[in-house]
Amino acid sequence: MNPMNKETALVVFSGGQDSTTCLFWARRHFRSVVALTFAYGQKHVAEIDCARAIAEEAGVEWHLMDVSFIGSLGRNALTDSSIPMDEEKPAEGPPNTFVPGRNLFFLSIAAVFARERGINHIVTGVSQTDYSGYPDCRDAFIKALNVSLNLGMEEQFVIHTPLMWIDKAQTWQMADELGVLDLVRTRTLTCYNGIPGDGCGQCPSCKLRRAGLQQYLRVRSEE
Ligand code: ZN
């Protein structure tokens, strides 16, 4: 491996609210930032256009990697348009929008990609707080994977999860403090129905995002 480049961070970047906030967080904390977007067979390829445009605006190097095999490995509502999405979190198990192995693959591939470039800092926008029932967003999984990657490649990767312990309202607050509240609000795509910005307003992702924004704006107006 190249000498560790502690000045550079690689951001796993989907073009959604969380990873966009992380992109600007990384820009604040590292001298240079590289963004890596995965095409995993998601129904809404507009996500990729959002990611490309935001990376360009942020002035960070952007890479797109095709990992569409992930979507075809296991059936789920994010990559298979014949499956209607769960509106609510089921009583047991993850919702059918869970893409099994997604973060495992993303972070493992990101680590190999980073290693090639002498980068050991990897940033991901996963959060355990407004936990959507995705087991691969939890802190224990990320820490375990970090150890595995270091052992498996004999490296010293550090996986940063700036959103792990904050909720959606606090994620909006972070975006505001980074000076990108409007950018995150209008340019990112989080909606399960593929509508950028404020989205469809109906899907679980839009509801979570909107509730967080309203809560944050309310708190801010009271200050
Ligand atoms: Zn929506």
Image (cartoon, rainbow, N blue to C red):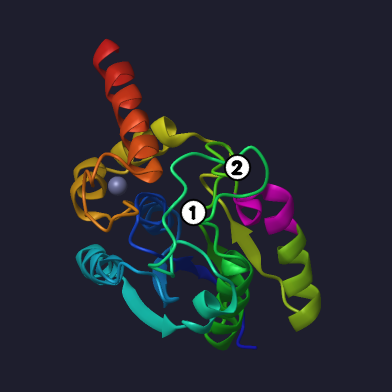
Is residue 145 highlighted in magenta?
A: no
Left or right: 157, with 12 as reference point:
right
Quadrant holding the N terminus: bottom right
The percent coordinates of residue 163 (x first, y second) are 51, 44
Q: Which residue is mark 2?
A: 128
Residue in front for this viewpoint, 79 or 105 = 79
Q: Is the residue marked by circle 1 packed among few (<14), some (14-19), or many (20+) residues within 10 Å?
A: many
Q: Tell me the CA gap for discs 1 and 2.
A: 10 Å
Residue 20 in the image: above or below residue 6: above
Name the residue rendered at 39%, 36% in the picture: 208
- Segment tinted magenta in the rendering: 134-143
Residue in front for this viewpoint, 48 or 184 = 48
Mark 1 residue element? loop
Residue in front for this viewpoint, 77 or 197 = 77
Is the CB of mark 2 within 8 Å of ligand 1? no
Residue in front for this viewpoint, 96 or 154 = 96
Name the residue rendered at 47%, 66% in the picture: 12
The percent coordinates of residue 129 (x first, y second) are 57, 37
The percent coordinates of residue 24 (x first, y second) are 35, 54
- From the image, give the main secondary structure of the stretch colored magenta: helix
The amino acid at mark 1 is Gly
Q: Which residue is mark 1?
A: 125
Q: Is the residue marked by circle 2 packed among few (<14), some (14-19), or many (20+) residues within 10 Å?
A: many
Name the residue rendered at 33%, 77% in the picture: 62
Is residue 141 highlighted in magenta?
A: yes
Name the residue rendered at 26%, 48% in the picture: 184
Mark in front: 1 vs 2:
2
Left or right: 138, with 44 as reference point:
right
Quadrant holding the C terminus: top left
